[in-house]
Image: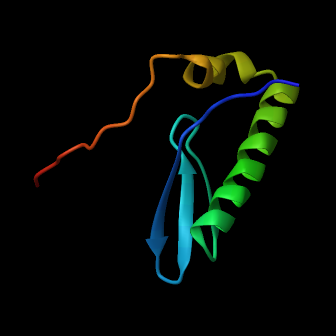
Amino acid sequence: MKQFELTAVVWKEGKAYVSKCTELGVASYGKTPEKAIVALGEAVELYLVNAEKLGFFEDVKPSIVSAARFTSPLHIQI
């Protein structure tokens, strides 16, 4: 079994909380932030299992194994 440390971003949208794994672009939701994170974990797990089965795991692997990852605010003015 492989274990990965990924990033979850959570925000409120209407009455639900949306969660997104920034490394993979996988998203989910829940009624609370905690439930949104649990649902995201399940979605990411399914995504990675399918990536292995479909043969594109090596394509996404660099974004989930790199030790040089960080998050930062991005300021945009339009």
Residue 65 sits in which quadrant?
top right
List the single residue furthest toward the front: 34
Percent from the top left, x then y, of residue 52?
A: 83, 25
Q: How is the image coloured?
A: rainbow
Percent from the top left, x then y, of residue 1?
A: 88, 25
The residue drawn where x is 72% and y is 57% is 38
List the single residue furthest toward the left: 77
Residue 7 sits in which quadrant?
top right
Which image quadrant: the C terminus? bottom left
Percent from the top left, x then y, of residue 46?
A: 81, 44
Tell me: 53 left or right of 78.
Answer: right
The residue drawn where x is 45% and y is 24% is 69
Image height of 74 relative to 63, above or below: below
The residue drawn where x is 76% and y is 34% is 48
Percent from the top left, x then y, of residue 68?
A: 45, 17
Image height of 68 relative to 45, above or below: above
The residue drawn where x is 54% and y is 34% is 23
The tally of labels here is 0
Image height of 75 relative to 52, above or below: below
Image height of 56 relative to 8, above or below: above
Residue 40 sits in which quadrant?
bottom right
Tell me: 54 left or right of 32.
Answer: right
List the single residue furthest toward the bottom: 15
Tell me: 61 left or right of 47.
Answer: left
In the image, 69 versus 61, the foreground residue is: 69
